Image (tube, rainbow, N blue to C red):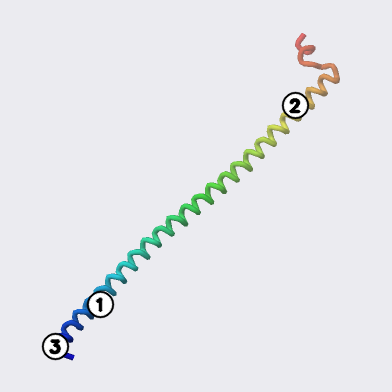
Amino acid sequence: MTVTDEKWQSEWNDRDTRDAEARALNEATERTKEQAYQQSINKAAQDGQRNIDQAMADAAAARAAADGVQLVADNLARRLAASEASGNSCTAAAS
């Protein structure tokens, strides 16, 4: 190998080293971005699940409240029916 060939080979080796370092740095940067994106996706999924869980709990509470209202309405309807059947209507008691 001549001195010129060695010089060119050294320059090619330096270039290859710089390219490999740049590629490694770029890969590390892209992986960091990907991890940040994945964390963002995971947080959105967790927030969504938390919202679903809260909506389910709210729906259960609303069903329980509706059942309570229905029970009160049924009791009032029975009392009114019993009162009317016995002749003790509210208007009769008021007169």
Please report the residue visible at 72 percent of the width from the left and 29 percent of the height from the top. 73
Please report the residue visible at 26 percent of the width from the left and 73 percent of the height from the top. 19
Specify the amino acid type for callout 1.
Answer: Thr
* First-in-chain label (1 vs 3): 3
Q: Left or right: where does residue 95 sit relative to residue 5?
A: right
- Circle 3 packing at 10 Å, graded few (<14), some (14-19), many (20+), is few
* First-in-chain label (2 vs 1): 1
Q: Where is residue 94 in the image (x, y as percent from the top left)?
A: 75, 11
Compared with 16, 4 (above or below) is: below
Please report the residue visible at 25 percent of the width from the left and 77 percent of the height from the top. 17
Q: What element carries label 3?
A: helix
Q: Where is residue 88 in the image (x, y as percent from the top left)?
A: 82, 17
**Label 2, label 1: how far apart the Cα atoms are:** 88 Å
* First-in-chain label (3 vs 2): 3
Residue 49, which numbered label?
none
Asked if the residue under mark 1 is in contact with the one under mark 2, i.e. CB atoms within 8 Å, the reply is no
Q: Quadrant of the C terminus?
A: top right
Q: Which of 18 and 4 is in front in this view?
A: 4
Q: What element carries label 2?
A: helix
Compared with 76, 26 (above or below) is: below
- Identify the residue position indicated by label 2 in the image: 76
Q: Left or right: where does residue 64 sit relative to residue 89?
A: left
Specify the amino acid type for callout 3.
Answer: Val
Q: Position of residue 28 (x, y in %)?
A: 34, 68
- Identify the residue position indicated by label 1 in the image: 17
- Identify the residue position indicated by label 3 in the image: 3
Q: Is mark 1 on a helix, strand or loop?
A: helix
- Circle 1 packing at 10 Å, graded few (<14), some (14-19), many (20+), is few
